Amino acid sequence: MMINVKRYGLLVMLFLLQVNLQAQDQDSVARMGGEISLERIRIFPNPASASGSLNFNRVPAEVKELKFFNTHGRLVKTYKPNKKAKFQINISSFSTAGIMVIKFISEDDQYLGFKRVLLKR
């Protein structure tokens, strides 16, 4: 059975992204000094309006960077959060809407995990 890529390309791509994300899904990472839990991080609103902002709550102090990737795997933005557990990011400058994967990077450049958010136009 042949799949019409032009017609189903986006659906197939989103399915493969979902499978890949489920395989990599981590809510916490064991570290030498203990465990960093990402499951407590809250990102709201989700879905979010692409002309607004995202609020982050309960972000561990060990998080040095947030990297936003689109569904094509391209890096859209990189943010360095302040050392507060709560902060806000203006997303109106993002060039794309859709599913964004936010990767959390530690102070020693280790991948900590990810969260997903949907940006609407």
Image (cartoon, grey):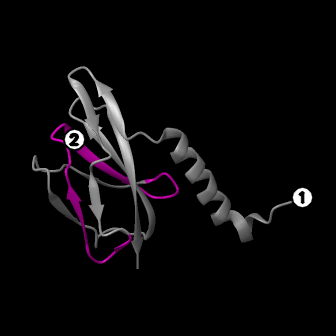
- How far across and down, in percent of the image, does residue 13 sit? 62, 57
* Crowding near the residue tagged with mark 1, few <14, some 14–19, many ≥20 C-alpha atoms within 10 Å: few
Question: Position of 99 compared to 39: left or right?
Answer: right
Q: Which residues are magenta?
A: 47-74
Q: Secondary structure at mark 2?
A: strand
Numbered tag placed on residue 40 in the rendering? none
Q: Residue furthest top?
A: 32
Numbered tag placed on residue 63 in the rendering? 2
Tell me which label, 2 or 1, sits earlier in the chain.
1
Up the image or down, 40 lies above or below 32; here it is below
Number of marks in the image?
Answer: 2
Q: Quadrant of residue 57?
A: bottom left
* Crowding near the residue tagged with mark 2, few <14, some 14–19, many ≥20 C-alpha atoms within 10 Å: many
- Give me the residue at 79% from left, 66% from top: 4
* Residue 57 among magenta residues: yes
- How far across and down, in percent of the image, does residue 24 sit? 49, 39
What kind of residue is marked 1?
Answer: Met
Which residue matches tag 1?
1
- Give me the residue at 22% from left, 41% from top: 63
- Give me the residue at 51% from left, 47% from top: 21
Report, in whole angstroms, how far the alpha carbon at label 2 lies from the one at label 1.
46 Å
Q: Quadrant of residue 45?
A: bottom left
